[in-house]
Image (cartoon, helix red, strand yellow):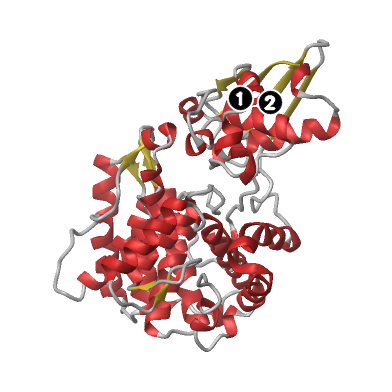
Amino acid sequence: MAPDYLDRLAEFVASVRLADLDTSTVAAAKDVVLDTIGAIAAGSRLAENANFARLAADLGGPGNAVIIGHPHRAPPMWATMVNATAGVALEMDEGSRLGGGHPSIHVTPGAIAVGEDLGRSGPAVLESIIAGYEVTSRIGTATEIRPEVHSHGTWGTIGAAAATARLLGFDPAQTRLAMNLAVSMSPANTWTPCLEGATVRNLYPGRSGFQGIMAAHLSRCGFTAIADGPADLYRSLLGDGFDPDAAVDGLGAPGQFRIQQNYFKFHACCLYNHPALDAVQSLMQQEAFGAHQVERIIVHAPPIAQLMTDPAPGNMLAAKFSIPYAVAAAICYGNAGVTAFLPERVSNPDVRRLAQRVAIASDAEMSLRRYDYPAARVAIHLKDRRVLEASVTGQRGDFSNPASREQLRGKFELLSRETLGEGRMQQVMETVSRLDELANIADLTALLAGP
C-alpha cells in the first residue's frame, strides 16, 4: 500500500538533512530565522509582552529557554508562547503566499526553544525549522479555508509539532502521530479580533507553538490521534475542502522548498495591504503629489479584503487590518512602517480624512496564491483630474520580487537595535549567518536575552 500524504510528510520531516539541500535553501532558511528574531525583538518591547514574559517565567517555573528581549528563562513551551506572540505584535513577520499564512513565527520560536533546552546544534535546529515550515505551508496550500476563519495559528500547530518531533529524534511513525495530535489541538479564530484590534489575536502563533510542542510530548505519553487530522478539521469545521495531493505535490524538489518561496514584510501591516501599498509608493515615486491633492482612491483587491475597509480604526492593531488607513498613512507619512501605525499616528486627523476617500473594490480573480494575475490595482484620482494607476502582482520582499540581503539586514537592524543594542545586534547577524556551523544553538540564544 502506497504511503499517504501524512506518511510522506512525516518521512520528509524525519529525513531532511542540510547536507542534502541546495545552498540556496540553507541561505533562505537563515534569512528567515534572522527576520523572525528581528520581529520578536521589536515586539518584545510592547508593555503587554513584557508583562507576559514575567508571567511566563512565574507560571512556567525554572527553564532553559530564553525569552527574547527579557532577562527571563522558562520551559520551552512557555518561552515559545511569549516569543511567538511578540513576533506578530507589529505585523512584521514573514509569511508564505502559497499557503500556511506565517509559517516561521509558528515554527522558529519553538524550534529555537526546544533546541536550546536539549542542547542541539545549529544545523539540527535549522533542519527542524525547514521541516516544520514545509509542513505548515503545505497544509495551508491543501486547505480551502472558510472566509470567516482567520487561519493565523491554525496551520502552525502541525508545523511546530513537526519541528519538535525532529529535534526529539522521532521516527516517521511517531512524527505522524505528533502531527495528527497537534491538528486536533489547533487554535480556531475568526477575523473579528484583528478588525477590532483586540491583542488577544497576537497569541495565535504563541498558542500554536505551545500546543505543537505539547503534542509531540503527548505522543510519548500514550495519547492517540485520529487517522487524518487535517482532513477532519479542514473538510468540516474550519475549511470548505482539503486536497491531500496538494500537500505533497513537489515535496522535496531541489531548490523548491517553501522556506525559500516566502515573503518578507516591509510594511508593518496585514499582507492584504502590501500589494496596494507597493502600488501607491510606486505612483508617489513617479508623480509628486500630497494628500491635499487627492480626490479619491480606488483599490481593487481580493474579495477577502472587503473585511478590511474600516477607514477609522480604533487602535494600532485594527489599523494594521485597514486598507484605507494603510493607504492614507503611506501617502501622509511617506511609508507604512512600524511608526506609521503607532497609536498617536493612528488618530492623526489628516490621515483619517484621507482614509475616508479610499474605496475598496473586490476583484474575484485576485488571490494572494496567484502569480499570474495582479494582487492589487490602485487608481488615485487627483483634484486636477489626473488619474494615476498601478498594479502589483508580487509585492516587494516576495520571492517573486525579492529583497536584497542588504535590505533584509537593514530591516533586522531597524527592528532589533533598540532591544539588543548595536554590539549584540551585529553579533546576532554574524551568528545567524553561520547557524549551519554552530555546535550548540546556545551560541545564538545567549545573545538574545534582555538586560
Q: From the viewer's perspective, is residue 160 above or below residue 280?
A: below
The amino acid marked with disc number 1 is His
- Label 2 residue SS: strand
* Residue 218, percent from left and from top: 20, 70
Quadrant assignment for the N terminus: bottom left
- Tell me how far mark 1 sits from mark 2, CA to CA: 6 Å
Q: Which mark is residue 317?
A: none
Q: From the viewer's perspective, is residue 18 above or below residue 44?
A: below
From the viewer's side, name the closer residue of 128 and 408. Answer: 408
The amino acid marked with disc number 2 is Val
Residue at 63% across, 74% down: 424
* Residue 4, percent from left and from top: 31, 62
Quickly name the residue at label 1: 300
Q: Is residue 329 left or right of residue 75?
A: right
Q: Which mark is residue 378?
A: 2
Q: From the viewer's perspective, is residue 451 above or below residue 363?
A: below
Residue furthest front as drawn? 451
Residue at 53% across, 52% down: 95
CB atoms of marks 1 and 2 within 8 Å:
yes
Mark 2 residue crowding within 10 angstroms, few (<14) / some (14–19) / many (20+) = many
Q: Is residue 265 left or right of residue 304?
A: right
* Residue 83, percent from left and from top: 44, 62
